[in-house]
Amino acid sequence: MIVTLQSAADPAAVQRALAERGLWVRRLDGGDRVCFAVEPHSSSVTREALLGIAGVAAVAEAPSAHPLLDAQPPRVRVGAVEIGAGAPPVWMAGPCSVESEAQIREAAAALAPLGVRFLRGGAFKPRSSPYAFQGHGARALPWLRRAADEHGLAVVTEAMAPEEVPAVAAHADLVQVGSRNMQNFALLRAVGAARRPALLKRGMAATVEEWLLAGEYLLAHGASAVVFCERGLRGFDPATRNLLDLGAVALLAHVHRLPVICDPSHGAGRRELVGPLARAALAAGAHGLLIETHADPGRALSDGPQALRPHEFAALVGREVAHG
Ligand code: PEP
Ligand code: MN
């Protein structure tokens, strides 16, 4: 924001008043009037509050690059579930891949009593190797839907290509755009055109601004809401699969006031770290968690090392696994 002073104003007094509001300002010289630029990382303050300072003539805001996102409320509704500021944290859980109808039914039955609201599982899988399991594709979507419906769960699952979006949108409550596709603009347009809520995972090398702009694409093309998901950035150290950026989670939750969840499973890549990072994400302001689980991780067709077993997931959410 640029604050322009009245010609008779005392610049030092105005600067003091701005500093008292926690703002970090820079004096701009050269014009007829004294101006102060309020640095973007200063505390959040409204234009009206600045206009109330004695000696301030005008406050100009740089036009936002993502006006639709700025206007999105901090809490959105996906089916019957509220996600965002003020709503209880939302648990999304399930296997990395939908491996069979029996497997996803078993997962839904195990997870629903633990407070999970969304069943996850990939039908279309983005795999680094063309020889790895690619997912069962469209035929797994009804398996996922039926399993979720049996237990009153919502569905979140990924579409990787524009032509997959109609089928995914017909079966899912929340259409997932994966990390590798965050800037696949053809896909963002197609997901928007489905006019459904979207879960936008952060690209593994994307800046926060690029992530927000991808969200703006979804809204500009018709998505009814965008929920952001931090899943870790590509780092230099293979000790963990990715670097989970909890600063970005806090930034979206507390400064941008947007619905944001966290995926510590892909963030960590190993199951021992999922619980600690999940708790850290909630402390940072995450409005929900996306967690991979598997009944038998050693036999999982993808991402076994990061999958929590049902009893480990139950321990994380503080519930007993139902027996019998
Ligand atoms: C997933 O959640 O299934 C997935 C593939 O995650 P990401 O896009 O974050 O790698
Ligand atoms: Mn996975």
Image (spheres, helix red, strand yellow):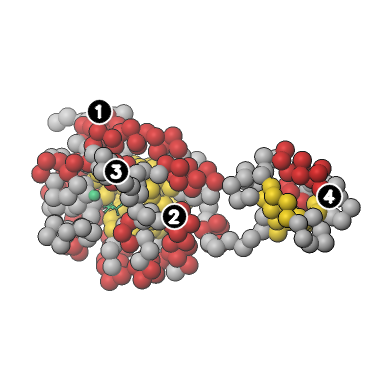
Quadrant into which the C terminus falls: top left
The residue mark sitting in front, 2 or 3, is 3
Q: Is residue 157 left or right of residue 33?
A: left
Q: Residue at x 76, y 44 (%)?
A: 15
The residue that disc 2 covers is 207
Q: Residue furthest left?
A: 299
Dot 2 or dot 3: first in sequence order is 2
Question: For this view, does 287 lie left or right of residue 57?
Answer: left
Q: Residues within 10 Å of mark 1 (few under 14, many from 20)?
A: some
Q: Amino acid at mark 2?
A: Thr
Instruction: Kindly identify the residue that appears in the image at 28 percent across and 58 percent down.
Output: 158
Identified at 82% across, 43% down, the residue is 13
Mark 2 and mark 4: Cα distance apart in space: 37 Å
Q: Position of residue 133 (x, y in %)?
A: 13, 57
Does residue 96 show up? yes
The circle drawn on residue 237 is 3
For label 3, the SS is loop
Q: Amino acid at mark 1?
A: Glu
* Vertical comparison of 39 with 65: above or below: above
Q: CA distance from mark 1 to mark 4?
A: 62 Å
Residue at disc 4, secondary structure = loop
- Which residue, as the protein is rendered here, is positioned at the far front? 30
Q: Earlier in the sequence, mark 1 or mark 3?
A: 3
**Position of residue 154 measured from the top left corner of the image (x, y, whole percent):** 31, 50
Q: Decide: few, some or many residues near mark 3? Use Cα within 10 Å; few <14, some 14-19, many ≥20.
A: few
Q: Are marks 1 and 2 in contact (CB under 8 Å)?
A: no
Q: Which mark is first along the chain, 3 or 4?
A: 4
Badge 4: residue crowd in 10 Å (few <14, some 14–19, many ≥20): some
Q: Which residue is mark 4?
A: 55
Give the residue type at disc 4. Answer: Gly
